[in-house]
Image: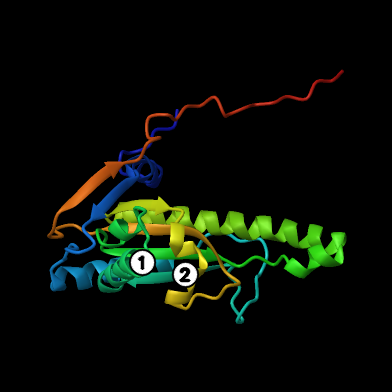
Amino acid sequence: MNSRPVSDPLTTVREVLMRRRTEKVLGDVDAPVQTPENQRAQFDAVVRKCVLDSGWAPFHFVRGVDDLAEPWRAHILWQDQAQALGKVLKHQHGDATKVPPLLCGCGAVVLVTWLPETDPMAFEKGDCTSLQKSAARDEEHLAATGAMVQNLLLLLTAAGMGTYWSSGGNLGKSVGFDLLGIPASERLIAAVFVDYADTQGEVTKKPGAHRDKRGAAWIREPSISDG
């Protein structure tokens, strides 16, 4: 019988997986949170390293844009820039969603994008072969980027930071991309909001809605019959 010590790597990874949870931290756009500067610098360094290490996700195809193999990109907004964006979205673009409060309640936000290969003109040209090939590769690129995001969530959780994976709302639309200088050829897959400890200011925290809805019924163990 194999026994594993409590501190072995498998137990550690499982513990981090179970500890990761969704928590929305909503701040006041007109009175955003503040993290003490010395602590913020330390937290920023941790986030930057977590983003870098999350890039060890597997990818099937080399994307090859800008001579980079990875099919993803990460755009990091630190606290001051996140809050500035939140104010612009609310006051200049009328964004009444939770995105501006999320931007003004976080320590940082990482916008993770992926780079599709599908040529929009291929639809007009009726080039089915090209469409099928690029669509298959895009599925691989998207899956790889999802793995990169999960890596990031787990690394941040292991570092003691709260996270929320958001679809991003206006952050993934032209208004957000234009404000941040993100190429239109990219697609947002995740806005990962990162909660910093010891942050000062009024916030509202909301847990994820699906934490207790997990089960094991999605697992199958098929067998091949001889007949």
Q: Position of residue 184 (x, y in %)?
A: 57, 73
73 sits left or right of 211 in the view:
right
33 sits left or right of 77 in the view:
left
Q: Are marks 1 and 2 in contact (CB under 8 Å)?
A: yes
Residue on which the image places disc 2: 175
Residue at x-position 29% and y-position 68%: 87
Q: Nearer the viewer, residue 129 or 168?
A: 168
Residue at x-position 41% and y-position 52%: 165
Q: Position of residue 130 (x, y in %)?
A: 83, 64
Task: Inspect the image, locate mark 2, and give the three-letter code of the amino acid beneath it.
Answer: Val
Is residue 90 among the parts visible in the rendering? yes
Q: Nearer the viewer, residue 35 or 43?
A: 35
Q: Position of residue 166 (x, y in %)?
A: 42, 53
Dividing the picture into quadrants, the one containing residue 105 is: bottom left
**Please, is residue 146 above or below residue 73 in the view?**
above
Classify mark 2: residues with Cα within 10 Å, few (<14), some (14-19) or many (20+): few
Q: Secondary structure at mark 1?
A: helix
202 sits left or right of 96 in the view:
left
Is residue 50 among the parts visible in the rendering? no
Q: Position of residue 77 (x, y in %)?
A: 35, 70
Residue 44: numbered disc? none
In which quadrant of the rendered image does the C terminus lie?
top right
In which quadrant of the rendered image does the N terminus lie?
top left
Residue at x-position 14% and y-position 54%: 202
Residue on which the image places disc 1: 89
Task: Inspect the image, locate mark 1, and give the three-letter code of the amino acid beneath it.
Answer: Leu
Q: Secondary structure at mark 2?
A: helix
